[in-house]
Amino acid sequence: MPAATANVSPAFRVLAIKAVFTIVLFIVTYLVLFAASLGLTFLCGVLALRIVSAGVSGLTIALGLGIVLMGLMITYFLLKFIFARHKVDRTGLTEITREQHPELLPWCGKSWMKCRRTFRRRFTCRQM
């Protein structure tokens, strides 16, 4: 065995394989959903054309436009989901420093050590 290769336990290897399999399954499922949404959008367009070609009136044009927009919205929201970003809103929070509250931060550190958590470098609180 080369020196650069790390020794991993069989349990870790199984969990790593499961994680990779889950990611690949998500990607495949999402691609199938996206292909289905494109097919549904195409079918909605065909249906809208058939409805409008059956008899041109304000009602059929509105119905056809609604059907086309429904198909486009499904595809749009699938794309929007995959590129969505989650931002944490910290506008109402105020940072607490050691200079402001010298007794509070050591107490928090002791409490976190009891809970076996890592000590955070920044503390924030909400305005009351």
Image (tube, helix red, strand yellow):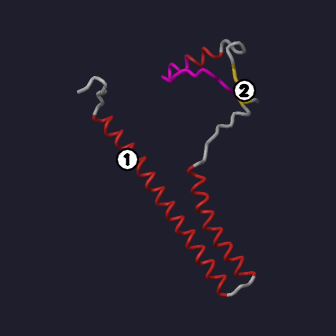
Query: Looking at this view, is 67 or 95 the one in front?
Result: 67
- Residue 13 sits above or below residue 97 on the image: below
Which disc is residue 94 wearing? Answer: 2
Q: Quadrant of residue 122?
A: top right
Which quarter of the rendered picture does the C terminus lie within?
top right
Q: Reply above or below: 30 against 6.
A: below
Q: Is 100 placed left or right of 76 in the picture?
A: right
Contact flag, marks 2 and 1 (Cβ < 8 Å): no
Assess disc 1: are there few (<14), some (14-19) or many (≥20) residues with their C-alpha within 10 Å of its C-alpha.
few
The answer to if 112 sits in the magenta stretch is yes
**Residue 36 point in image, percent of width and height:** 50, 65
Q: Which residue is mark 1?
A: 21
The residue positioned 39% from the left and 42% from the top of the image is 19
Q: Position of residue 59 (x, y in %)?
A: 73, 81
Q: Residue drawn at (43%, 47%), measured in percent from left and top?
A: 23
Looking at the rendering, the stretch of residues picked out in magenta corresponds to 110-125
Foreground residue among 11 and 113: 11
Give residue 101's mark: none
* Amino acid type of the residue tagged 1 in the rendering: Phe
Helix, strand or loop status at disc 1? helix
Q: Quadrant of residue 86?
A: top right
In the shown orientation, is residue 27 left or right of residue 55? Answer: left
Disc number lying in front (2 or 1): 1
- The answer for how far apart the CA atoms under marks 2 and 1 are is 42 Å
The disc labelled 2 sits on which kind of residue? Answer: Thr
Q: Residue furthest bottom?
A: 55
